[in-house]
């Protein structure tokens, strides 16, 4: 078993592992999964096995965690993962219309990825950006007060960046 | 605080309008159970961690505006509890409706139908109709292993299987993946299990989500006769309840958890009964005619053996009798009586698997030194020497683990390789066989600080080293109890019943020691070799190839293949009698089925004795057990315990045994969870699971 | 007078009685000519059992044993088996490999029909099951099973029939 992760991710792993005392390394499972996912974009069986080994838990326990949290993904998503909030504040401010616009303009459904692998969309619950609703998050970047027009601009920018 | 008030010793509360009193710290659900008031629950299972997953046990409590789960609520002073209020009744109804939203309601084809807790609950508390009209989420049924099937649609996610596997057995092979309506139980090796294959998850499942492949679609629970008996495999003596239909064992479990093993069974106890119906079972006596073993009638075979025995006896010839580790106490007693009074020989022995004799001798004059199964669960500290309990004595491992879980018992493990106890033991050491006594000195200080100690030791501790171990234990200055680990269902009973040349039943010296097992096989003057339920010629030959060999066995073993006469014997599941387990508790065998053409070993002895014209007494199991109770010291056990299927502890002699037995002959076969001596190859299940001998087995 | 009154009343009674007799003579006969003619049944008559097939020609019985459990005279014997992709006998997951009814004991109470969750077992109208040999009164599934409907996919049942040999 070998998984190749960048030195930076390795360092982040080591830091979080060191943060927990002996016998409590299991607490590092979720951060380790997120750090690895940030780099690889997908959580593979090999990755879960490696994390289980390092965090001193059974493989099945890592699998349970990955299965539970929707932000941990076993299926690959686009390079830019566009998340549209349709929770109550965003919905009242036009989030639902925005979501439908996103689906139609990109010809994608929930959790689908564009053919070039660049963009994927997801309908998500509250991101804590209610004061600037409707909100859209692209990977870790927030976009506030997004209108359908603004949404198209964001997508164009992303496509431009490639 | 300046003043401290003593914690209350009694809690006053009100339950359904009645004033009640209980101990502090009582769970609400246990309180209602004590008072005979039913609070339904799926996920609550006594002895395992609390889950509060199923929400069936919601009750109304005055201190909370919302309903509280009875399984995690502790009764407090002044609590007013309602378990039958309209709100609670409505909540139960709604919970069941919710649990059934994705349930396929396929009770007619479900193996659990008829003994399903969900079925019972819906019948008693449920609503007649569901308001859900949406299409049910369905995932197909799939096998987790050759013995365990999982049907996600029926699962109610109570986590019982997850907890019994993790907490009970320490295997942790099951988990819950995904979330919400998509949640399901997942095995640890992708889509397959890599575990003990014990099937505890099947038994504990309140619904038909986890089912047994061996029992799959065979019959329905009410069609079977349920016969409680003792497992025929290892020495732990678990009670197993056989489901019998048409003279065939359909399944084994412990549906009422009434034995000393409670909810525990391993793969052998739960699935390993299939040897009983193996097509190779012998069903007719066989006599060697013109060099070939040919089926003959019982009378002919008995006459041939009786004639030969009388001839050899009259000529003053040499008999060698090899007894079994699996036959009942009654059969063992009758056989040694046959040998000693009928044939006038002390040449009787069996494959010794644990040095009980030296232990009893070394402990002479001391009271209460032999541990019972209950002691394993109660002791404050235990020391395991030279045995992988989880593999060789799974019930003992389970009890120690349970003790650690419930009472924080401190476990010490001194074994040659990694064992399951390592994970939670107070101390572990890797010590090669034979070096344990020296290594123990390193733990002396630590062990002496324990309030009490229970020492379990394998076959590496015998003779002199066993005496050293007892010296060590007695020098600790704390109460110490001992368990000499033995291999098979009645290995302990074989020693107690005097199936060794040195001893009569009850550890009474025989005076004139006869030949031991290897001596018999090495004796070129041996005239008759009589083998009962053993396979001494599996890997060797006998010095006198002309000796007349009589074998009583279930199968044509290597020894039986060389015999002159073979009698087809009944298995432990086909006879009445008693067996003694590793901790010296006598339990009952109940005849569940019958295989055509076989006779119990006891009946064979009786008929043979009669044919020879011997006066050995009647050969009914009850009569022989009465004789045992009168003649074998320590076996005067309480009959009601036995009669009700319980385990009656024996109290062996307490005095010097006054004879040195051949401790060097003590040798354990080292069976694992997936082997059972010569019976291994006749159990299909043991040979089909992925973990079968020589194959993958990960959990330590 | 008294005599005349009696005579008249007797004549009236005879006329009334014979009126019914002659009137009925003109009605169609209800008497059945069995065994010379075929007997007639009410639809709900409980005769020998018939095991039904579903619209695909598969057996409806899933071997749930509920009929056997409901049977007060314990005359139903079942052995279940699992359907496979190669051999599909019933619509459910399992089917009855052996399904015997012992007509020595059956009391035609219809509880089995009531109990059946899949409407697989029904009462037919066959009642001529008397026999000089009681051993022939144990009916096997093959004897009770409804014939596959014409035009429906029927399964080669004969290959399976040889399995159903074990008796009660």
Image: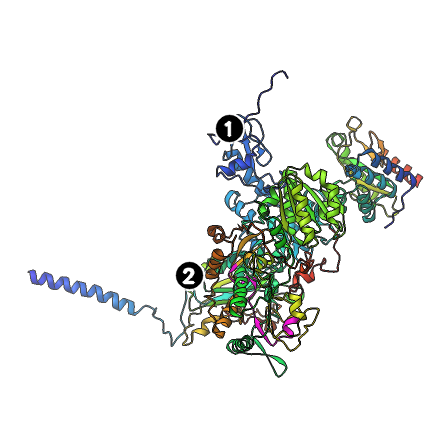
Question: Residue reaching furthest bottom?
Answer: B290
* Depth check, front residue: C32 or B260: B260
* SS at circle 2: loop
> What is the quadrant of the N terminus of chain B in the image?
top right
> Which residue matches tag 2?
C109
Foreground residue among B304 and C79: B304
Q: CA distance from mark 2 to mark 1?
A: 53 Å
Residue sitting farthest toward the right: A161
User: In the figure, is residue C127 to the left or right of B127?
Assistant: left
Q: Is residue A69 left or right of residue B666?
A: right
Residue C143 coordinates in the image, percent (x, y) = 51, 71
Taking the image as drawn, is residue B167 in sight? no
Q: Chain of mark 1?
A: B
Which residue has dot 1 on it? B13
Which mark is in front, 2 or 1? Answer: 1
| Residue B553, horizontal then vertical, whole percent | 59, 69
Measuring 70% from the left and 52% from the top, which residue is drawn there?
Answer: B195
Residue B574 among those drawn in magenta: yes
> What are the residue bounds of the magenta stretch?
B558-577
| Front one among B671 and C48 | B671
Circle 2 residues within 10 Å: few <14, some 14–19, many ≥20: some
Label 2 chain ID: C
Q: Quadrant of residue A128?
A: top right
């Amino acid at each position: 078993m070998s998984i190749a992760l960048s030195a930076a991710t390795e360092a982040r792993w080591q830091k979080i592992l060191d943060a927990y005392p002996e016998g409590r390394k299991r607490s590092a499972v979720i951060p380790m999964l997120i750090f690895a996912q940030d780099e690889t974009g997908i959580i593979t069986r090999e990755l879960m096995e490696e994390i289980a080994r390092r965090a001193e838990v059974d493989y099945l326990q890592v699998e349970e965690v990955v299965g539970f949290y929707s932000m941990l993904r076993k299926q690959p998503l686009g390079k830019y993962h566009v998340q549209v909030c349709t929770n109550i504040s965003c919905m009242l401010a036009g989030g639902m219309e925005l979501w439908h616009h996103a689906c139609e303009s990109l010809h994608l459904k929930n959790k689908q990825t564009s053919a070039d692998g660049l963009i994927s969309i997801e309908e998500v619950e509250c991101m804590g950006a209610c004061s600037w609703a409707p909100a859209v998050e692209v990977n870790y970047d927030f976009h506030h007060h997004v209108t359908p027009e603004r949404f198209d601009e964001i997508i164009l920018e992303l496509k431009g960046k490639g | 605080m300046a003043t401290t008030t003593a914690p209350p010793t009694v809690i006053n509360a009100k339950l359904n309008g009645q004033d009640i009193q209980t101990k502090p710290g009582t769970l609400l659900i246990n309180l209602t159970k004590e008072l005979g008031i039913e609070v339904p629950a799926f996920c609550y299972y006594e002895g395992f961690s609390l889950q509060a997953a199923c929400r069936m046990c919601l009750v109304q409590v005055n201190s909370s505006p919302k309903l509280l789960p009875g399984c995690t609520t502790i009764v407090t002073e002044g609590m007013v509890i309602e378990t039958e209020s309209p709100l609670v009744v409505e909540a139960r109804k709604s919970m069941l409706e919710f649990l059934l939203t994705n349930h396929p309601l396929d009770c007619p084809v479900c193996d659990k139908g008829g003994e399903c807790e969900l079925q019972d609950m819906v019948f008693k508390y449920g609503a007649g109709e569901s308001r859900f009209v949406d299409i049910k989420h369905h995932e197909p049924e799939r096998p987790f292993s050759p013995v365990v099937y999982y049907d996600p649609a029926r699962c109610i996610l109570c986590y019982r299987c997850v907890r019994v596997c993790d907490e009970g057995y320490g295997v942790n092979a099951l988990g819950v993946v995904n979330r919400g309506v998509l949640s399901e139980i997942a095995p640890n090796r992708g889509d397959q299990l890599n575990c003990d294959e014990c099937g505890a998850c099947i038994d504990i499942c309140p619904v038909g989500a986890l089912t047994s492949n061996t029992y799959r679609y065979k019959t329905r629970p009410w069609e079977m006769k349920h016969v409680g008996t003792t497992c025929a495999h290892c020495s732990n003596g678990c009670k197993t309840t056989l489901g019998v239909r048409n003279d065939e064992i359909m399944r084994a479990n412990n549906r009422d958890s009434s034995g000393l093993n409670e909810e525990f069974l391993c793969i052998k106890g739960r699935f390993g009964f299939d040897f009983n119906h193996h097509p190779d079972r012998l069903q007719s006596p066989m006599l060697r005619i013109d060099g070939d073993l040919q089926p003959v009638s019982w009378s002919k075979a008995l006459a041939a053996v009786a004639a030969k025995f009388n001839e050899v006896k009259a000529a003053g010839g040499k008999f060698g009798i090899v007894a079994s580790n699996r036959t009942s106490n009654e059969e063992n007693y009758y056989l040694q009586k046959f040998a000693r009074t009928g044939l006038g020989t002390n040449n009787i022995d069996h494959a010794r698997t644990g040095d009980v004799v030296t232990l009893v001798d070394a402990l002479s004059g001391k009271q209460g030194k032999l541990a019972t199964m209950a002691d394993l669960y109660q002791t404050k500290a235990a020391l395991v020497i030279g045995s992988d309990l989880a593999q060789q004595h799974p019930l003992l491992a389970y009890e120690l683990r349970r003790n650690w879980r419930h009472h924080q018992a401190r476990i010490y493990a001194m074994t040659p390789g990694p064992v399951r106890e390592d994970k939670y033991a107070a101390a572990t050491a890797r010590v090669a066989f034979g070096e344990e006594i020296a290594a123990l000195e390193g733990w002396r200080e630590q062990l002496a600080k324990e309030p009490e100690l229970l020492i379990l030791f394998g076959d590496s501790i015998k003779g002199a080293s066993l005496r050293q171990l007892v010296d060590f234990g007695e020098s600790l200055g704390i109460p110490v109890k001992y368990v000499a680990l033995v291999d098979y269902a009645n290995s302990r009973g074989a020693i107690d019943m005097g199936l060794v040349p040195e001893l009569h039943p009850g550890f009474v010296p025989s005076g004139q020691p006869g030949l031991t097992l290897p001596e018999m096989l090495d004796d070129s003057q041996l005239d008759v070799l009589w083998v009962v339920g053993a396979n001494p010629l599996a890997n060797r030959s006998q010095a006198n190839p002309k000796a007349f060999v009589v074998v009583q066995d279930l199968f044509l073993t290597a020894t039986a293949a060389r015999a002159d006469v073979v009698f087809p014997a009944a298995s432990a599941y086909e006879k009445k009698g008693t067996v003694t387990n590793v901790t010296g508790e006598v339990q009952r065998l109940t005849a569940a089925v019958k295989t055509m053409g076989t006779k119990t070993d006891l009946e064979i002895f009786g008929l043979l004795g009669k044919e020879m014209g011997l006066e050995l007494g009647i050969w009914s199991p009850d009569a022989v057990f009465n004789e045992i109770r009168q003649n074998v010291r320590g076996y005067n056990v309480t009959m009601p315990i036995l009669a009700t299927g319980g385990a009656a502890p024996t109290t062996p002699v307490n005095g010097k045994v006054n004879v040195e037995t051949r401790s060097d002959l003590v040798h354990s076969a080292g069976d694992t969870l997936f082997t059972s001596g010569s019976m291994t190859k006749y159990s299909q299940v043991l040979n089909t699971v992925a973990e079968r001998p020589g194959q993958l087995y990960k959990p330590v | 007078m008294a005599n005349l009154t009696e005579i008249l009343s007797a004549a009236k009674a005879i006329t009334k009685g014979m009126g019914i007799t002659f009137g009925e003579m003109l009605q169609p006969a209800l008497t059945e000519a069995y065994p010379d003619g075929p007997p007639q049944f009410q639809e709900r008559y409980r005769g020998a059992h018939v095991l039904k097939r579903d619209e695909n020609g598969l057996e409806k019985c899933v071997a749930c044993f509920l009929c056997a459990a409901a049977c007060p005279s314990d005359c139903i014997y079942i052995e279940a088996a699992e359907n496979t992709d190669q051999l599909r006998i019933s619509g459910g997951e399992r089917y009855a490999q052996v399904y015997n009814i012992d007509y020595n004991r059956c009391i035609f109470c219809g509880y089995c029909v009531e109990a059946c969750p899949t409407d697989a077992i029904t009462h037919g109208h066959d009642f001529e099951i008397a026999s000089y040999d009681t051993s022939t009164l144990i009916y096997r599934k093959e004897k009770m099973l409804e014939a596959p409907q014409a035009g429906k996919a029927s399964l080669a049942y004969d290959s399976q029939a040889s399995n159903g040999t074990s008796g009660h």
